[in-house]
Image: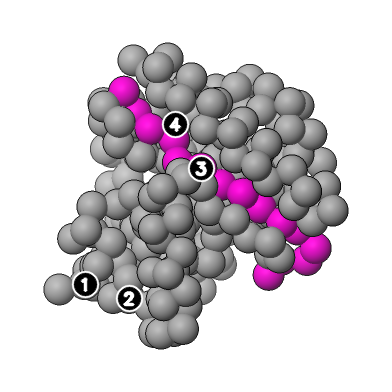
């Protein structure tokens, strides 16, 4: 059975996502405005998240607390422990393209770090917004390398049969080569190539994407695919 939404869980995740995108924190009034909800209806959620360490409060402003980060560390997820911003910067400099690191959050892909200049993809990364897995190269890589049960459950949530067929047709090539390609991104004039990032056990736990103008990226697809495979293999070997 595909996973279903739950009103309480949805509200908690909305609060965490709003606060995580505010480096200067936000007040209860600002949270209520963003959620289009009365302050009284979210005060209990916020208090509980502060109590458990998922939010911090300082001078009536709320910030993301240490608990989410600690969960990631305990799970030994490679993006939090082994792929540094410097790693991503090195990849961007070698490729001369934008580089983005993404993870799967439920049925979506979320960019958690980025290096590059301008572009719609970088704007999405900076906003930490969610995008459907099947629409991005990072998402399709994560879908392809998910276990069969998880992949079927995720695909069951999509209603565009044509989109599903295209992904299933592309999946054998992704599994064979390790990369997915968007020759023309739906976001402005960008092309993209993405590759899975493995943890020390060989499990794909994240994806890294290179994006840039089609005339800069497409003629170099073979080189970039080799670069991504070499780079992610190095990252996996350095995981701890």
Quote the CA–CA distance across marks 2 and 3.
Answer: 23 Å
Quote the CA–CA distance across marks 4 and 2.
Answer: 26 Å
Q: Earlier in the sequence, mark 1 or mark 4?
A: 1
Q: At which x and y percent is residue 195? A: 51, 42
Q: Is residue 158 left or right of residue 59?
A: left
Quote the CA–CA distance across marks 3 and 1.
Answer: 26 Å
Q: Identify the residue at image location x=41%, y=85%.
A: 161
- The residue to which callout 3 is attached is 195
Write the start and end of the magenta stretch as one range. Answer: 186-200
Q: Crowding near pointer 1: few (<14 within 10 Å), some, many (20+)? A: few
Residue 19, label in figure: none
Q: Earlier in the sequence, mark 4 or mark 3?
A: 4
- Picture quarter containing residue 208? top right
Q: Earlier in the sequence, mark 2 or mark 3?
A: 2
Q: Nearer the viewer, mark 2 or mark 3?
A: 3
Q: Is residue 155 left or right of residue 98?
A: left
Residue 191 forms part of the magenta stretch: yes
Give the camera-side residue of 180 and 210: 180
Q: Secondary structure at mark 4?
A: helix
Q: At which x and y percent is residue 132? A: 48, 66
């Amino acid at each position: 059975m595909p996973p279903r939404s739950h009103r309480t869980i949805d509200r908690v995740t909305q609060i965490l996502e709003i606060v995580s995108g505010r480096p200067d924190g936000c007040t209860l009034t600002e949270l209520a405005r963003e959620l289009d909800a009365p302050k009284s209806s979210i005060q209990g959620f916020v208090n509980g998240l502060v109590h458990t360490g998922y939010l911090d409060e300082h001078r009536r402003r709320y910030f993301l607390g240490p608990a989410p980060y600690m969960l990631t560390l305990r799970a030994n997820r490679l993006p939090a422990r082994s792929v540094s911003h410097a790693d991503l910067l090195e990849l961007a400099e070698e490729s001369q393209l934008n580089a983005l690191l993404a993870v799967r959050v439920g049925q979506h892909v979320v960019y958690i770090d980025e290096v590059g200049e301008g572009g719609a993809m970088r704007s999405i990364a900076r906003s930490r917004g969610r995008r459907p897995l099947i629409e991005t190269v990072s998402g399709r890589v994560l879908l392809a390398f998910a276990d069969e049960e998880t992949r079927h459950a995720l695909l069951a949530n999509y209603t565009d049969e044509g989109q599903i067929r295209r992904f299933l047709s592309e999946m054998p090539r992704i599994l064979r080569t390790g990369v997915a390609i968007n020759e023309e991104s739906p976001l402005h004039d960008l092309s993209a190539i993405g590759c899975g990032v493995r943890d020390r056990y060989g499990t794909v736990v994240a994806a890294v994407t290179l994006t840039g103008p089609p005339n800069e990226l497409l003629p170099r697809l073979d080189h970039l695919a080799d670069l991504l495979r070499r780079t992610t293999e190095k990252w996996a070997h350095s995981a701890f």
